[in-house]
Amino acid sequence: MAAMNRNSIPDTINEQDMILARNLTYIYKDEADEEMKPEETAGKKKEGFFEKSEDNAGETAGGQSAETFKGQFQETSGKTNGETTALRGVNLSISKGEFVAVLGTNGSGKSTFARHINALHVPTEGVMLVEGMDTKEEANVWLIRQKAGMIFQNPDNQMVASIVEEDVAFGPENLGMEPEKIRMNVKEALEAVEMSAFRNATPSKLSGGQKQRIAIAGILAMRPECIILDEPTAMLDPRGRTEVVKTLQKLNQEEHMTVVYITHYMEEAVLADRVVVMDRGQVVMEGTPREIFFQVELMKQVGLDVPAMTELAWRLNRQGMNLDPAILTVEEMVNALCPSN
């Protein structure tokens, strides 16, 4: 492993942490990044950055106390001397094998956070560690990108070859793997995303969901331990989204791969082990899907929706019904409305 600058490393590092951010702050020149739009944030103040509240606490469907939050913070992000603060003091750890969904409105900093994991950005202040390696250290970047692969929104922008098999082999070839190892990795990666039958196909002839699965296979062929996906289903139809999400669940559950999943689709976030909500460059809520989504009003305060069934339960309860506020799925709603004896 490459040498690390110990002066920037936290005193204690949990060996189970795949990703560790401490006081992560990122400031960029306005023309260099579009993650936060100065015209939308400059000079604004808003409510948010919720603190725990005992009097607001509720029970989840599993019977556990849910963390609830309230409070205010003075927002100062925006244009300052031609610079914008996209992340401010983010503290977050993600364990090996965990499936974490990151939510937030446009400009919340979620994509900027994702790019720090892959060392596409480096912190202005604070530290980002990927399996103990500091992303600020140039000597670590190559190893970090082998450990943590990244998938973006548009699958067409990630295709580099005219044959699926060659496209998947591109990453391992650039890592200098032996030809026999590349062939084995490509075969196993295509099997993992259930695209072996298309190994000789032309990527441009595939559906959006199939292309995104090929992009995932290209990352898997490099044998990463973590995969970061920045709104990978944003340009896909419902069928394509289902294909991609099922693939990710399989990789997480069967291969124990760490998944960091950025999405605007709440029904997809329900499938995660943990949900992180970002607003104006800060982590404002964190917990299991049930702990987060039953707080409908607080989610709306940061400009986000909740799963459709959670919203329905909330609206019915406001009309006098007494449903579990942490309902997440259609099946749970059916069971709540028509309980079996």
Image (spheres, helix red, strand yellow):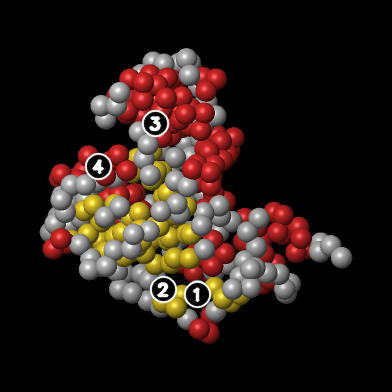
Q: Name the residue under label 4.
A: 143
227 vs 2, nearest the viewer:
2
Q: Name the residue under label 1.
A: 68
Q: Earlier in the sequence, mark 1 or mark 4?
A: 1
- Label 3 or label 2, whichever lies nearer to me, is 3
Separation of residues labelled 4 and 3 (CA atoms): 15 Å
Separation of residues labelled 1 and 3 (CA atoms): 41 Å
What residue is shown at x 72% (from left), y 59% (from top)?
333
Separation of residues labelled 4 and 2 (CA atoms): 36 Å
The amino acid sitting under disc 2 is Phe
Q: Is mark 2 on a helix, strand or loop?
A: loop
- Label 1 or label 3, whichever lies nearer to me, is 3
Q: Which of marks 3 and 2 is nearer the N terminus?
A: 2
Estimate the x, y position of residue 167 in percent, counting from the top left: 38, 22
Q: What element carries label 4?
A: helix
Query: Does residue 27 sit above or below 206 in this rendering?
Result: below
Label 2 Cα crowd, 10 Å radius (few <14 / some 14-19 / many 20+): some
Q: Earlier in the sequence, mark 4 or mark 3?
A: 4
The circle drawn on residue 221 is 3
73 vs 198, nearest the viewer:
198
Q: Name the residue under label 2.
A: 50
264 vs 7, nearest the viewer:
7
Query: Does residue 333 sit above or below 211 in this rendering?
Result: below
Q: Earlier in the sequence, mark 2 or mark 1?
A: 2
Label 3 Cα crowd, 10 Å radius (few <14 / some 14-19 / many 20+): many
Q: Do the numbered discs 2 and 1 sit on residues whose CB atoms are within 8 Å?
A: yes
* Tally of numbered discs: 4
